[in-house]
Image (tube, grey):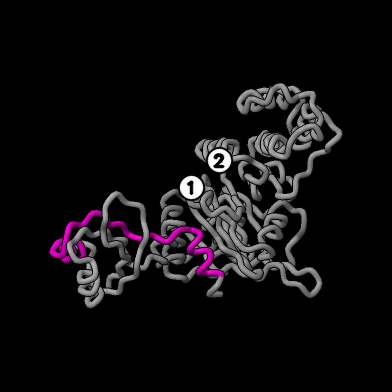
Amino acid sequence: MFFVPVYNFVPGCIFFRIKKKTLRMLFCNICHQINTNRLTEKTFGTSRGLNTFTTYIFSMDNLLRATHVSKSFGDFKALNDVSIDVPKGSIFGLLGPNGAGKTTLIRIINQITLPDTGEVFLDGEPLQPHHIQHIGYLPEERGLYKSMKVGEQMLYLAQLKGLSRPEARKRLTYWLDRLEIGDWWNKKIQELSKGMAQKIQFVVTVLHQPKLLIFDEPFSGFDPINANLIKDEILKLRDEGATVIFSTHRMESVEEMCDHIALIHESNKILDGKLIDIKRQFRSNSYEVGLVCDDKAAVAQTVSQKFDIVSADFKTINDELQYVVKLPDGVSSNDLIGYLSTLGQVTHFVETVPSANDIFIETVQNN
């Protein structure tokens, strides 16, 4: 295996004065070293070159990357060595109890405060002040000027995000018509309900079409109809290419919307990954069972001798035996169905997949 130093690495572009064949061999060499954990400073000539290259390579599929971020306020540790990767085009759930550190991390991403240690990268580049133009942030604490008129305020905030006044007005007209709130233009914020003001702030957040959208409790103040409306708009923005960080205590929203999650508790990240993979990790190999049989007590006794069972209570139109049955290793769901079929008519059979709420509670309590 040959070894070629690489110099002058710039995120997004590498300059070489070498032939194409050598270039192909070089990248094969680098990829091999990555896969075998042999990538060192020698490959790049400097430690900075190595750090920049590895950050870029592993950020190619991530819009945002935070690495080993810590933050303290006096003696209080708000974040302790937290790292997250937010994939491009995903909805990333940032979860945790009150005071866990979620808002501190969001403020660091928005450059409202700086980390004590660690780094944040946006689209492969170290976070810089100009990146704020690529971020839309809807904070939990609403920040509209109550005495200003809706239209005047939205134009002002849009121009702060770099839009020209004509372009801002054009986009505002689109969004106000889309949400059927065009007649609010000349109203003052103080004349609006909390939910109505929340719609205005949502529009201001997404108006400049940022790469990254951060929503902190976006459904606060909404009735169910408007909460569903905003949820659908967030999903559409994701489908159109936006990446979303979504912080909420509403676990049903996490189930419906999030592709990936990270759980922070007492300043530490204690869980992260694809939501579907985490559900698999927490599955218990248990099944809700409904069984119509002649002698419920006798059948329950028979089943309990072979499996761990607990009583269940689910809605049904049958008068049936209802249990959750936990399967031991080596026994499949087909084996269980076959066995139950010998005891009666199986009318209900569903795997008990843990909900996001179940996972949240169990993980926090165990930590």
Residue 111 visible: yes
The residue carrying pointer 1 sits among few (fewer than 14), some (14 to 19) or many (20 or more) residues within 10 Å by Cα, namely few
Instruction: Indicate the secondary structure of the residue bearing disc 2.
Output: helix
First along the sequence among labels 1 and 2: 2
- Residue picked out by circle 1: 256
Q: Residue at 55% of width from left, 57% of height from top?
A: 85
- Residue picked out by circle 2: 231
Residue 208 visible: no
Residue at the limit of the structure toward the right, as seen here: 147
Q: Amino acid at mark 2?
A: Lys
**Which corner quadrant of the image does residue 65 belong to?**
bottom right
**Which corner quadrant of the image does residue 70 belong to?**
bottom right
Q: Which residues are magenta?
A: 336-364
Horizontal and vertical percent for residue 216?
Answer: 66, 50
- The quarter of the picture where the C terminus appears is bottom right
Instruction: Indicate the secondary structure of the residue bearing disc 1.
Output: helix
Tag 1–tag 2 contact (CB < 8 Å) = yes
User: 217 or 107: nearer the eye?
Assistant: 217
Q: Amino acid at mark 1?
A: Glu
Q: Say whether residue 218 is left or right of residue 238.
A: right
Q: Reply above or below: 188 against 26.
A: above
Q: Say whether residue 84 is left or right of residue 358.
A: right
Horizontal and vertical percent for residue 106?
Answer: 68, 55
User: 291 or 296: nearer the eye?
Assistant: 296
Q: CA distance from mark 1 to mark 2?
A: 9 Å
Horizontal and vertical percent for residue 98?
Answer: 67, 62
Q: Residue at 40% of width from left, 67% of height from top?
A: 1
Q: Reply above or below: 77 against 287.
A: below
